[in-house]
């Protein structure tokens, strides 16, 4: 009996979607788990935690810079084979990270993980919608987002607990083992997926000449910058304003992740009916959440409700953006998504820098206000662009 026959039961669309969801969980866990390990890593390497935190910025900017070049490099590779190679790089890089004797080796390992991250998120969004019928596209994207939510709910806190109990290096080694299991699941469940409409350098001018796609990229940078200007410093903000204990802050972070699950359901229910209205609404409400963070943070009850709404909105925003990018770049999906992923990470880095600047010059309590102002600018830009596009389409139909 051949290997193909052995795994034939698993070669079904939703098994592949589930395997990619598990992959998203692993990739998102490793991206943010160092946030909970900075103290332990700093103590081990005789460094200040704030200096260790530089590797988070290095990671985000590496993904931002590497996404498009790496996508162009691997654009012709069959997708299942490509994911196997990506996960090998991911696993080896975690082994390097887990045995790093100094900060330099640690950063080298994290850069390898960032390269794997850049390729995975460039191809996984297009892959998951190829596995299912067109009518189930939104549902499949929602499944992929669940991996991100579970990483925030369980992966990051568990990684921190393991790091505190067994050492931070053990956390990275366990992630490598999880990635090995995910690799086996992908091999068993994914069919052969030849590269389709990945795009090339020749596709880039066409993408750059698509006005609405450029608008969406701009909205991505602004909204993600606004979000991470606040989210990056949510822990010290909650300490300062809400006087929250460590356990309460862990509860808030878990609640933020939990919100992604109902958000995926809402996306599947409402986005297909009015996609651009859904996108604009999420951008505007994210801005409103950031502006209202301070007054809602004064009591734990209102802050919990606020965090639940905010977490759901930012997940909905990401899903809507991915769906719009796929729709606007049907002939160069992987290239367009790689640009989106890179710009998303530009926003992560820019948001962390903005939040740091605000905290040092105005105080942590003002991060929500400044983040909200950037978010409001993004919402205004999005509304203006969509209004102009709607009027032009109406004029074209009348003409």
Image: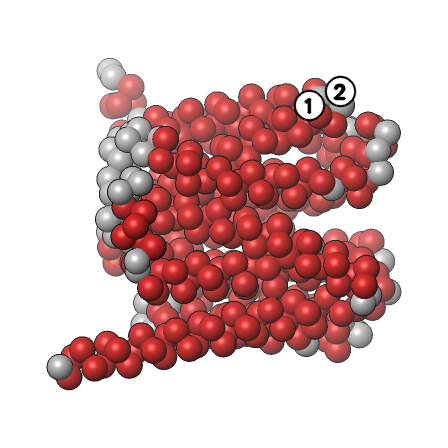
Which sits in the foreground, 84 or 203?
203
**Residue at the image point whose x is 51% and y is 33% from the top:** 115
**Residue 146, above or below 52:** below
Q: Secondary structure at mark 2?
A: loop
Residue 167 falls left or right of residue 229: right
Which residue, given by chain and number where applicable, does mark 2 sit on?
101
Quadrant where the C terminus is found in the figure: bottom left
Q: Which mark is residue 10?
A: none
Which percent across, then down, holds residue 362? 81, 67
Q: State the separation of the CA atoms marked 1 and 2.
A: 7 Å
Where is residue 130? Give x, y as percent. 28, 45
Task: Name the residue located 27 percent from the left edge and 46 percent from the top edge.
Answer: 203
Q: Identify the residue shown where x is 24% and y is 40%.
A: 196
| Residue at the left extreme, as displayed | 399
Q: Is residue 309 visible?
A: no
Q: How is the image coloured?
A: secondary structure
Quadrant position of residue 50: top right
Query: Which element carries disc 1, helix, strand or loop?
Result: helix
Q: Quadrant of the N terminus?
A: top left
Decide: few, some or many residues near mark 1? Use Cα within 10 Å; few <14, some 14-19, many ≥20.
Answer: some
Residue 110: x and y in percent read 62, 31
Q: What number is the disc on residue 105?
A: 1
Q: Residues within 10 Å of mark 2 (few under 14, many from 20)?
A: few
């Amino acid at each position: 009996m051949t290997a193909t026959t052995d795994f034939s039961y698993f070669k079904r669309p939703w098994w592949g979607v589930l395997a990619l969801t598990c992959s998203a969980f692993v990739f998102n866990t490793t991206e943010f788990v160092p946030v909970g390990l900075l103290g332990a890593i700093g103590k081990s390497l005789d460094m200040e935690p704030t200096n260790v935190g530089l590797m988070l910025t290095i990671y985000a900017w590496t993904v931002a810079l590497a996404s498009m070049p790496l996508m162009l490099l691997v654009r012709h590779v069959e997708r299942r084979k490509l994911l196997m190679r990506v996960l090998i790089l991911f696993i080896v890089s975690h082994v390097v990270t887990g045995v790093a004797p100094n900060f330099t080796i640690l950063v080298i390992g994290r850069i390898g993980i960032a390269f794997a991250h850049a390729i995975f998120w460039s191809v996984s969004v297009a892959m998951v919608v190829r596995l299912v019928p067109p009518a189930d596209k939104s549902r499949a994207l929602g499944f992929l987002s669940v991996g991100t939510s579970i990483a925030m709910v369980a992966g990051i806190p568990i990684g921190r607990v393991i790091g505190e109990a067994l050492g931070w290096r053990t956390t990275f080694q366990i992630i490598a083992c999880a990635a090995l299991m995910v690799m086996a699941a992908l091999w068993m469940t994914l069919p052969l997926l030849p590269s389709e409409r990945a795009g090339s350098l020749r596709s880039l001018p066409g993408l750059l000449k698509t006005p609405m796609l450029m608008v969406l990229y701009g909205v991505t940078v602004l909204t993600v910058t606004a979000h991470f200007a606040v989210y990056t410093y949510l822990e010290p903000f909650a300490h300062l304003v809400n006087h929250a204990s460590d356990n309460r802050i862990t509860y808030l972070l878990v609640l933020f992740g939990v919100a992604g699950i109902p958000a995926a359901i809402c996306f599947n229910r409402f986005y297909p009916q009015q996609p651009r209205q859904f996108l604009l609404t999420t951008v505007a409400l994210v801005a409103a959440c950031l502006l209202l963070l301070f007054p809602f943070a004064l009591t734990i009850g209102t802050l919990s409700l606020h965090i639940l709404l905010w977490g759901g909105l930012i997940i909905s925003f990401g899903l809507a953006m991915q769906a719009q990018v796929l729709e606007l770049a049907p002939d160069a999906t992987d290239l367009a998504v790689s640009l989106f992923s890179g710009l998303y990470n530009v926003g992560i880095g820019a948001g962390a820098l903005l939040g740091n600047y605000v905290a040092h010059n105005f105080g942590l309590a003002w991060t929500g206000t400044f983040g909200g102002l950037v978010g409001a600018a993004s919402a205004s830009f999005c509304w203006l662009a969509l209004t102009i596009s709607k009027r032009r389409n109406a004029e074209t139909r009348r003409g």
